[in-house]
Amino acid sequence: MTVMYSKLVGSSEAAMRLKKLISMVGPSDYAAIIQGQTGVGKELVAESLHDASRRKGKFVAVNCAAIPRDLMEAELFGYEKGAFTGAVKTTPGKFEQANKGTLFLDEIGDMNLDLQSKLLRVLENSIVTRVGGRADIQLDVRVVCATHKDLEELVKQNKFREDLLFRLNVFPIQVPTLRERSDDIPEIVTHLLKNNSYVSANDAPFGFDKSGLEALTTYEWPGNIRELRNILERAKVFFPGQNINREQVTQTLLGFNQNAFFDHVEENENVWSVLDELGGAERGHEADERAPPTAKDFSRLFDSSNSVDVRRLLRDVEIVLIEKALERNAGNTSEAAKDLHLQRTTLIEKIKKYGL
């Protein structure tokens, strides 16, 4: 029986297939290439491979696209004191740091051809030589690579060595996109909110109601898990302490428009001002400044008055909302009626009635 050992969250068919592959490939010492779109979690897959292995050494990650070309060789293989300007002491490279463990080379497709040749030699002989040094250093390192590029196409363009691709591509692993395992999104969101620092000790916790989770599940997620993390960061700022619904997800979190967002805030403030003028009702101390008043908020009018002029209240609130809908739609009554869930003829009658 294969042990499903992985840090990956999710129980969809795509996630379970990936977990099973990790559990099968992990215990071996062979190289692997992890492929997938940007943001799908390729480094997490690499960490899972290391955790599923029998290796006692460290998991060491290197982003080949983030390190300048002239520094990459020293970064990977280390350097001796005096090897170049600034080399004030002998420094082991990433290969030595990963001895008995796993070296993860992210964005391997961005590595230049000269360094590819040296990497191939290390993979074949398990020996590194520091920059400026002469001694061969024997190592036991498993190399796992990742890329979002098509390496076979890069080979055709003479931008990637074919022999290196053959050497690395012992176990190709394709990571599914988030939209390909959208059923996992509620579980992933719960996991991220529980185990990450989206809410600090000074922040009000937030979550998503059923409609909000459905909106997240049906979104395309071009940025994959990375984009989902960003959305949760945005939610922490805009909706602290709230149970976020579909409208808030689609209009503010997924399709954030600064002007539209503050128009919405202003609209809510206008309705609150009507309440304040009518009865001096105060918002509950837990109410969010950006949230529209609820039926319970209107009931607070009795806290400061023995009677409430319901007709005037409804009229004033209706006027505020109609004016805002017309403003948002540049006077287009058809679009304003849609925003207010009214028939166009009904809206026109109210406009005439209130002299708007």
Image (tube, helix red, strand yellow):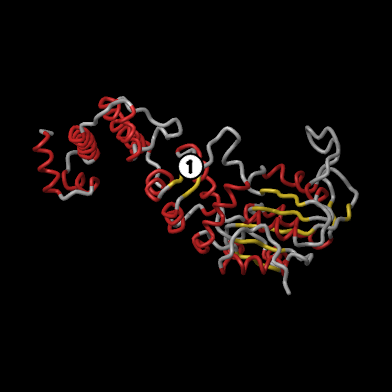
Residue at image point 65% right, 65% down? 19
Question: Which quarter of the picture shows residue 24?
Answer: bottom right
Residue 346 location (% of width, % of height): 13, 47
Residue 213 location (% of width, % of height): 46, 54
- For label 1, the SS is helix
Residue closest to the far bottom: 1
- Graded by Cα atoms within 10 Å as few (under 14), some (14 to 19) or many (20 or more), the crowding at tag 1 reads many
* Vertical side of 300 occupied by 106: above or below: below
Question: Which quarter of the picture shows residue 253?
Answer: top left
Residue closest to the far right: 135
In the foreground, 183 or 311 = 311
Residue at image point 72% right, 52% down? 115
Q: Is residue 36 left or right of residue 113?
A: left
The quadrant of the picture occupied by the C terminus is top left
* Vertical side of 65 occupied by 176: above or below: below
Amino acid type at mark 1: Ala
Residue that carries the numbered disc 1 in the rendered image: 235
Residue at image point 21% right, 35% down? 310
* Vertical side of 255 occupied by 221: above or below: below
Q: How many marks?
A: 1
Q: Is residue 189 left or right of residue 76?
A: left
Q: Is residue 20 left or right of residue 340?
A: right
Residue 83 location (% of width, % of height): 83, 38
The quadrant of the picture occupied by the N terminus is bottom right
Q: Is residue 166 visible?
A: no
Residue 107 location (% of width, % of height): 63, 53
Q: Is residue 54 visible?
A: yes
